[in-house]
Amino acid sequence: MLSVVLWRIERWLAPFVDLEPELHINTNLDTEGSETIPLSEDIVNPGRIKLGPQDFELKKVLGKGGYGKVFQVRKTTGADANSYFAMKVLKKASIVRNQKDTAHTRAERNILEAVRHPFIVELVYAFQTGGKLYLILEYLSGGELFMHLEREGIFLEDTACFYLCEIILALEHLHNLGIIYRDLKPENVLLDAKGHVKLTDFGLCKEHIQEGIVTHTFCGTIEYMAPEILTRSGHGKAVDWWSLGALMYDMLTGTPPFCADNRKKTVDAILKDKLNIPGYLTPDSRDLIRRLMKRQVSQRLGSGPTDGQAVRAHPFFKNVNWDDVVKRRLDPPIKPVLVSEDDVSQFDTKFTKEIPVDSPDETTLSESVNLIFQGFTYVAPSVLEEMQTRVTIPRSPRRMPRHHHHMHHLQHHQQNHHHGSGGSSGAQGPGTSRMMGPGGGGAGGQAMENGAWKMAPHHLHHPHQHPHQHQQRVNQMVPPNQQQPIGQPAQPGHNQPQQPGQAGVSGAAGGGGSAAGSRPFNAASISRLASRTPPHLQQFAPRPSPQDEMMDVYPEMSISYESDRIIDETKHATEESKSEVDYRLKERIEDIQFRRDELQQQKKDAHVEEEALKVYKRRTIDAINTLREIAVPLCQKCIALRERRQGADLVNDGVDRELRKELDVTEGGIALLEKVLEQCGEQIRRLRATIYLLDRDLADKDRSIKIDAKNLELRPNQMELKIYAGRVPLDPYNSTDEEWIMVTNRNIEATAKEINSAQPLRSYVDQLLRQVAEDIRTQVERTNAAFRERVSEMRYTKIKLENVHKETVRQVNELTRTVTRLEREIAEKEGYVALAQTRLANRSQRPGIELCRDNVYEGLKAELAALRATIAKLDGSLVKAKATLRYLLNTQVMQEEAINLKTESLRIDEVDCITMRESFKFQSF
């Protein structure tokens, strides 16, 4: 009986025994409370970030330059582990060769540290090695604006306005800090994952440029450089507004404003050529480009003290809410399609296909050279703030919070209840007991140290306690100021004075032995222990067995006889009950398997439907991309080309109307396809949700089958059978069999409903794709027919003009010959007039009476009069002939100009537009 009492006491006091070995810092220490700490920089200066290339995993190559590469990397250490960044690697040896390159590199590092703006890339880390410099920047997965501009061809004015607004705010912020950018171009404007602008590459920036201060460095990209940089006459912040105008021109037309075959011709064009702005742009956009690209700096918009405010006040931005712009509330016109955080699809595949390798640099630099880059290391303030909010790990294990120890203590307590007290035998060695006798110290009984909260003693229930009562009590906590270590005397304030000689319970809750420094149980210790046992444990004091009580009442009854009778009565019933339970287990397993097969079939159908929807989603995405990247730019280019017509041919004819209708039909089709794409995504998400529920139900059913199959295999004489210890309820069921069937049927019905919803959606998507393709194809054919009709009309008109021109040329030639004959006849008649006058003059010299009016005189006089009349008639004819000739010549010139206009219009429509449109092979998706 004494052993039974000891076993019960040990078993039910096991929760108060902490079986976890104490963490010793130095077992050789003799002084209580002292500890040995190894001195190192990590202990003296905890939390300091030391980064290097080893802390980043190279994922992809994003670009290359003259001094290094840009990688996509994943951080492998620290609080921001698994985050993606862009790592810019620069070679020191290449930089230090040129003093300006060294200055630009340091300026870029300093500017990135100083600037914080929503539209400027953020520098997160900067560090260096012996031969390289590393800049860790935020990863902008949207790619370069240059790539999107290449895909679109040209931007609409609303799209360009969005990007210009964000770029203006970034430039204005830099100017307010005394920084000029000097390298604004589409390649240096990146988009983040949401489509907003971020300026990058600050290697050509210049610091400390205030109002009136100029610099003379020749740098930038030729096509976007201001004239004052090219002439080296000194430049300031106004160069960025010239570059902004060039970028705006590029976005709206597809090319920079000044381009040539070589560098010299491009420079000459920037300095001398006229700025030609297409007529299809709105007046406000044309005016903004002209004012931004004034060669005279004083006349350039933004060159004054107001800087970017003057640019923002231009009518082109009259509908812009600048507060929404700076707070990133506007919806970006181009949203990058990304599949994951590390997506690089928006970057040039020429680089992303390369194997990312940070080549080792064996270059050895002198100490004086390395001093140039002193102070290059940097950590972003956001990272430092995050470090300061993290919990600092204590240096001493004795100061470590004991939350995990306490949880381990509770788990061990449950394990002891499950396996009995023998499961802890030998778990603690000498001197490591957490409940010691008088010589072992009394601090081991605490579940948590240093004022931490701990579980109250009455939270650890006994087998006769109701499980719900235990669950309710587990959530109760005792404040540190009310805690009392288990196994130690109460504090004076609790009216529980310590009895002389009273000690804590000794020994581990293990097999028959006791730990060193402990005493075995005896009768005296049992009585003392009973007096110290909490009230809720005293009900387990030993009591007489049922056999002893029965023998006291019926001393003449034979225990053996009664036992045989009970055995005979219960044996058959027990076997029948077990057979019935086995049969029900088999039926239950078959029922679960039947339901599982139904779920698996439903899951298979849902997967098939999901894959089919993915195919249709891919078709829809391909259709949208084709229309957006080919059809829309093709139509826009045709409209832009036809704007180049001149004179009478620049009219809004049927071709223009059909082109605009084609653009509207294409954009309408894109809108419909985008809407149905959202429906496909939502339906796929709902199918995945039902599949997830099916997977959970299938996993539960598989586990139930395994449990019941294992129960079916169990025999009464097996060793692994367990006696119920009272920690979990034997009847935990909270649903009926009908509810179980209803849940499974509900999952099946929900999946079937989503499958039935997905099938008509697929039919609708297929029908919509065909309808959109047919509508656009019909409109394209109408537009092509209008082009052919227009070309035919212009060709017929040109032929008629050429025939009329030929007749005009013939008449001009004939009149030219007539004028020549008339002039010759007049000259001949004037010779006869001179002859007659000479004769009359000679006859007037006759002497005396011989000077008379004879027949000769009368004949010469009549001849002279006739010649003069003839000459007058010839002169009149000559004047008329010359006037007619001049008219015909003017007509000939006008006809030639009209023929040239028709020729140019024919070239635009027939050669440029029709040839380009014929290359577009429309597909039926």
Image (cartoon, helix red, strand yellow):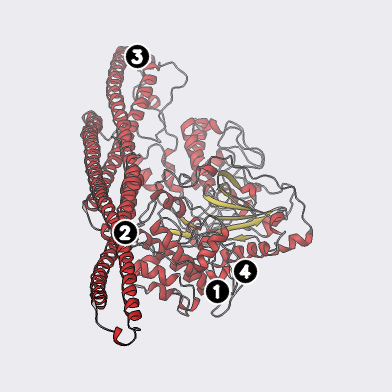
In-front residue for pair 307/674? 307
Disc 1 to disc 4, how far (Cα)? 11 Å
Q: Position of residue 336 (x, y in %)?
A: 40, 49
- Does the CB distance between marks 4 and 3 fall below 8 Å? no
Q: Which residue occupies the extreme bottom position in the image?
A: 848
Give the labeled residue for mark 3. 567
Disc 1 crowd, CA 10 A, few/some/many (<14, 14-19, 20+): many
Looking at marks 4 and 2 on the same chain, the residue that comes earlier in the sequence is marked by 4
Look at label 1 and name its amino acid. Gly
- Does the CB distance between marks 3 and 2 fall below 8 Å? no
Look at label 3 and name its amino acid. Ile
- Where is 492 relative to 783, above or below? below
Give the labeled residue for mark 1. 236
Disc 2 crowd, CA 10 A, few/some/many (<14, 14-19, 20+): few
In-front residue for pair 691/345? 345
Disc 1 to disc 3, how far (Cα)? 108 Å
